[in-house]
Image (cartoon, coloured by chain):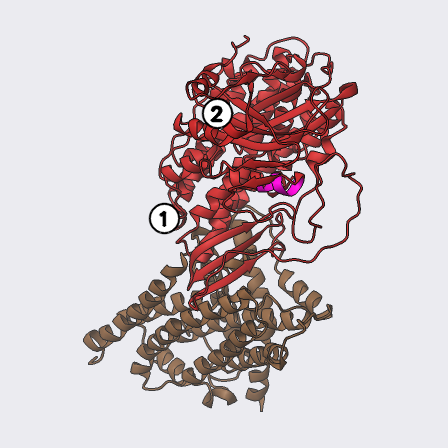
Amino acid sequence: MMRPTNTWFAEKLGDHGIYTQYMEDHHPAHMPCLEIRLLDWQQAAEIALRLEMRLVAVWATEGGCHDQPDSMFAYMGLAHPEHRHVLLRTQLGRERREIASISRHYIAACRMERHMQDMLGITVSDIPDGRRWIKHEHWPEDALPLRSEFAATTRMAQAEGSYPYVSSNSEAVCQIAVGPVHAGIIEPGHFRFLTVGEMILNMEERLGYVHKGIEKAMCGKTAAAGIRLAARISGDASVGHSWAFAHACEYAAGIRPPRRASYLRGILCERERMANHIGDIGAICNDAAFSFMHAQMQRLREDMARMHKQLFGHRLLMDTLIPGGVSIDLDQRGCRLLSEQTRMLAAEVEHLRTIYADHPSIQQRVIGSGIVSVNEARDIGLLGYVGRASGNYADERIEEAYPPYNELEVHVPQGRHGDVATRVWARFEEIADSARMIIRLLEQLPEGAVSNAWQAPEAGTSGFSAVESWRGEIACWLRFGDHGLIDRFFVRDPSVINWLGLELAVRDVPVPDFPLNNKSFNCSYSGNDL
Amino acid sequence: MSSILIQIIQALLLLLLAPLATGFVSTCKARLQNRRGAGLLQPWRNLRKLFVKEVVIASHASWLFRTAPYVVFTATAIAASVVPAMLVDTPLSLTADVIALVALLALARFFLALAGMDIGTAFGGMGASREMTFAALAEPAMLMSIFVLSLSAHSTNLTTMITHTIHTSFALHPSLAFAMVAMLMVAVAENGRIPVDNPTTHLELTMIHEAMILEYSGRHLALMEWASMIKLMLFATLIIDLFMPWGMAMQATPAALAIALGLWLLKLAGLLLALALAETALAKLRLFEVPEYLSGAFIIAFLGLLSYYMLEAGV
């Protein structure tokens, strides 16, 4: 089913006198890319906000083959629950690499704009927070890693500098610095707390410690090699990221995976969702020292990982997706094993859920802790289970309804309280729903091939995709260059947006409740830092 | 002469069995969670490992940081050695005053908190501030609970109190029940166990006791860890002494001592098992609920005191 071109937003912009031009070499048609003038950039964001659109991402890139090589473009991705995604593109001035900030309209844009400043040297005027973000202070100021003249192997001198944290002059306010090295084995991130006694006044995140240069590393790779890298953007969401990448490639090339491949992708993605939610619920309980749940959930998660190793060759399901389809297949026995285990898991999780619900001591910890209100969640555009706990129900499996979800009914849990308990509740609901969908997909698994031949599109073609990973919507954009190699790449992990929610959630929360809240969000550091 | 020997054996037993007791609790917990666990001897292995590891000390650490582990360990070990485990009347029994015991523990705590702040990290200070806040509430509750017993024994000396309890015929004393509940609650808090503190956590921001010793390593850390294991043993033995001393040896005869040792180990295992059960069934309290928990313990002890005057004083 090919959707008609989405012209709704272009018409709306036209009503406000913003001239848009439809880009022919961007795919898919139902998520069009509209070229607008640079001076309309901020106003377009304002109109989008008034139309109740959600910001997906803001990014910038250098020009490709069809465009002048020394030109630079900024992109803005927007989504509306009824009208699908739309991209806006504008060309930056040749002399002045400058663009107006849209952070006043979309608060989540700020860190992405800081990323643009850091990596491409674009000046974002009117930005409310112009500090460096991913590029830490020890990078030289003039190093612009995403520019084409910057070789990935460049060795740089270490620069001196310091990061101006939000601070307080009051004597009653204490600063607590946590990380990036933690007492446990977790990803690195720095949290700066301003506290009054044991209450958190403000928490500021400092990320970027796991910056690996993925956007740069993707340039020059074939789609087949690129998807292996995409699977490693954030190891716990390897299927989500591979799928987003595969979709972007397939849209650009006009290839559609066979129906069986879509079903298998759906099974893998939902299994990944289950495994992560199960592991996280245990970890949340463990942070409140309720280790019984942790031990049980760890056991179930391990069972899943072993089954994945047995059936798909990788515990975390890496490299199971390829552009054009999947690299694995399920025989009769595999289907039976997977279906049996999924049923067993769902039943065990339901049982553990009653234990969790029947223990007042754990309930007392999670209920009412770390509240993100519905309004705050909407302003940020929180995604995934975090959004679903706070009245933001964006779900690409419904909005985009890409196969196999166009043939399935997805139940999105609709919470409103926005506390840790609601986030855990949303995860429990999703586990049950994923199990139901996996069994459905396995029962109706169509026969046929598992992949279609991959054929790279011509140079200059770009593709955009939005996929619902277990954490929430992953947005992926890429452009192909000569010889079928990827020319430019951008990916927005849901964590980029959800990290902001955590900063809000822990205001007026006691310091020892922070780990509990952090775990209930469980944002990816790697996916954020790229 | 032989009583001195028994005194020494008793003290050594407490010190040496302390890691086993901790291992016993974690093994019980593991079994309750359907895990195999690392075994009874794991705390011993950890200590052995720590004793041979090199000590890493922050460059701006003062003498306080270096000496604190020795002070903490010595104070706790002395406190443990005055608590009778098998033989009621030992040479140290004159010093076995409960108030002195609480003071010894307070001394250890004082140095622990100073050491936590000495390095100047946020966590050390945070842990020290939490520890002292809770100590200010836990100590009165503990003393109040002991006073309930002292009232009928007319003494705060442990030996006198135990002898008194053994010699009075068994009867249901509501005041004792109150005092015991309060004492159990305080013991959990004082030892940094769930639901007050989690000794196995890796989350710096939630720690109390662990936050203060976060900067320690090598033999310093081993002494600190060992001291906290001894403290757990001490509290368990103290609860046995005060509330269920039956079977303790009044004379130093081999038969009596053997029975006393066996019963002591049995009671100890019972108490530790109860701790493991509670730790499995409970999550940690919110930090701001810990003061409520401790004032609860104080009030329960106080009720014990009242009920003693109302129901038992004239009997």
Q: Which image quadrant: the N terminus of chain A? A: top right
Q: Residue B266 in the image: state x and y as whole percent.
A: 50, 65
| Contact check, label 2 and label 1, Cβ < 8 Å | no
Q: Which mark is residue A79?
A: 2
Q: Percent position (x, y) of residue A6?
A: 50, 14
Who's red, chain-wise? A
Position of the C terminus of chain A, as image quadrant, is top right
Helix, strand or loop for the magenta stretch, by majority? helix
Q: Chain of mark 1?
A: A
C-alpha span from label 2 to label 1: 40 Å
Name the element at disc 2: strand
Q: Amino acid at mark 1?
A: Pro
Residue A511 lies, with reference to residue A124, above or below; the image says: below
Chain shown in brown: B
Residue A285: in sight, yes or no? no
Residue under numbered circle 1: A360
Q: Given the image, on which type of amino acid does mark 2 rest?
A: Ala
The chain under label 2 reads A
Instruction: Look at the image and say whether residue A184 sits in the magenta stretch.
Output: no
Residue A103 placement, left or right of B4? left
- Residue A404, located in which quarter of the rendered image? top right
Q: Is residue A325 visible?
A: yes
Mark 1, Cα crowd under 10 Å, few <14 / some 14-19 / many 20+, is few
- Mark 2: few, some, or many residues within 10 Å (few <14, many ≥20)? many
Q: Are marks 2 and 1 on the same chain?
A: yes
- Residue drawn at x 43%, y 66% is A170
Which stretch did the figure color magenta?
A114-119
Name the secondary structure under disc 1.
helix
